[in-house]
């Protein structure tokens, strides 16, 4: 393992992001759903400090500007952008700096690599120059192609991977996580609820009783169980949540106080996710 790539210590509620080298709450906030600026400020008061932002996330822009204005070094601003060419990436980054009134982005994520964004020499060279200029601290991507993500984790300039990982789709455990040790990039998980397929009732499902010490009326899973399943995996630095309102945000944030799942609980959640996948072949479908 090369210097600077040592795996950072994690507890259930916080960790230090590699490359960016900032302590972060392990539940990041995605601003493209139902939150408004006051919700962002409230979340920051509770300890949230990882903000997923994009040029279209207009509802939360003022809230993010407010919290980073108070203490920029405390917060991680992760831009979800896109670019097939280097000039598009630079335009996106510099436009974001103006909109957010900040000197740098902690990470610029090439969105949906292979579909909406390209990973070619012109793009990579531009991202490296932006790092040298101090306009971004890390290079990231969101990617659905797990095998390609595994190859890039082994050998690329990418510092952070935003990946799909949940009880319905645990394939990162085979395709990505075994390849992280060499460079130790950051791993940000999203879709913890599998587009709510894990939390909606599913007819005709037969599961054994919940194995935890406290009885739970499951299935379906609660959102908290979905997030705990993800955060229990030691390879995941943080999970994103995209609540529709303040009440959902409060409930999701409370997950961090509940701690990791036991091995038996994780196995139960995984078994239920397997049943959901067998019944719900397509994602996004209710």
Image (cartoon, rainbow, N blue to C red):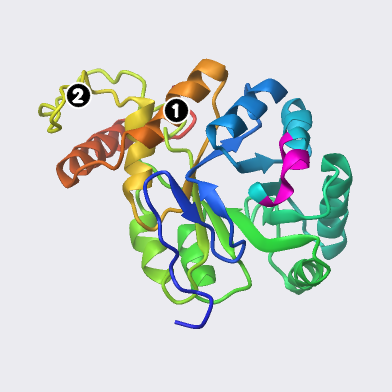
Most frequent secondary structure within the magenta stretch:
helix
Q: Where residue 31 appears, x then y in whole percent?
A: 65, 32
User: Quick check: 144 left or right of 269?
Assistant: right
The vertical placement of 231 against 186, above or below, is: above
| Mark 1 or 2, closer to the camera | 1
Q: Residue at x 45, y 28 (%)?
A: 252
Residue 141, image quadrant? bottom right
> Is 208 placed left or right of 192 in the picture?
left
Inter-mark Cα distance, 1 to 2:
25 Å
The span picked out in magenta is: 67-73
Q: Quadrant of residue 70?
A: top right
Q: At numbered mark 2, what does the secondary structure look like: helix, strand or loop?
A: loop
Q: Residue furthest bottom?
A: 2
Q: Position of residue 161 (x, y in %)?
A: 55, 58
Q: In this view of the protein, can residue 169 be seen by the observer? A: no
Who comes first in sequence, dot 1 or dot 2? 2
Quarter of the image that includes the N terminus? bottom left
Please tell me which residue is depicted at 42% across the width and 32% down the height of the picture.
193
Residue with the mark numbered 2 = 205
Q: Which residue is mark 1?
A: 252
Residue at image position (28%, 23%) is: 220
Q: Nearer the viewer, residue 144 or 237?
A: 237
Q: Is residue 20 left or right of residue 24?
A: right
Q: Secondary structure at mark 1?
A: helix
**Picture coordinates of residue 2, whole percent (x, y):** 50, 83
Instruction: Decide: is 276 above or below 132.
Output: above
């Amino acid at each position: 393992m090369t210097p600077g790539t040592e795996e950072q210590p994690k507890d259930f509620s916080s960790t230090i992001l590699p490359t960016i080298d900032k302590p972060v709450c392990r539940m990041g906030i995605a601003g493209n759903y139902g939150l408004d600026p006051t919700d962002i400020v409230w979340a920051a008061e509770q300890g949230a400090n990882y903000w997923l932002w994009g040029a279209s996330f207009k509802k939360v822009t003022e809230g993010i500007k407010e919290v980073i204005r108070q203490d920029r070094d405390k917060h991680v601003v992760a831009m979800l952008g896109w670019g097939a060419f280097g000039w598009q990436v630079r335009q996106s980054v510099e436009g974001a700096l103006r909109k957010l009134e900040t000197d740098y982005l902690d990470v610029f994520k090439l969105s949906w690599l292979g579909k909406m964004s390209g990973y070619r020499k012109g793009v990579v060279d531009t991202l490296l120059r932006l790092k040298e200029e101090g306009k971004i601290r890390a290079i990231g991507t969101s990617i659905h192609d797990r095998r390609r993500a595994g190859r890039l984790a082994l050998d690329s300039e990418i510092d952070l991977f935003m990946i799909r990982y949940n009880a319905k789709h645990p394939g990162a455990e085979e395709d990505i996580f075994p390849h992280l040790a060499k460079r130790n990039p950051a791993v940000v998980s999203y879709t913890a609820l599998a587009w709510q397929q894990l939390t909606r009732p599913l007819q005709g499902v037969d599961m054994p009783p919940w194995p935890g010490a406290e009885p739970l009326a499951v299935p379906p899973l609660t959102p908290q169980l979905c997030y705990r399943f993800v955060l229990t995996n030691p390879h995941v630095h943080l999970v994103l949540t995209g609540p529709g309102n303040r009440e959902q945000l409060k409930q999701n944030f409370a997950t961090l106080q509940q701690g990791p799942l036991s091995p038996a609980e994780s196995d139960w959640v995984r078994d239920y996710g397997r049943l959901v996948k067998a019944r719900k072949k397509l994602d996004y479908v209710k």
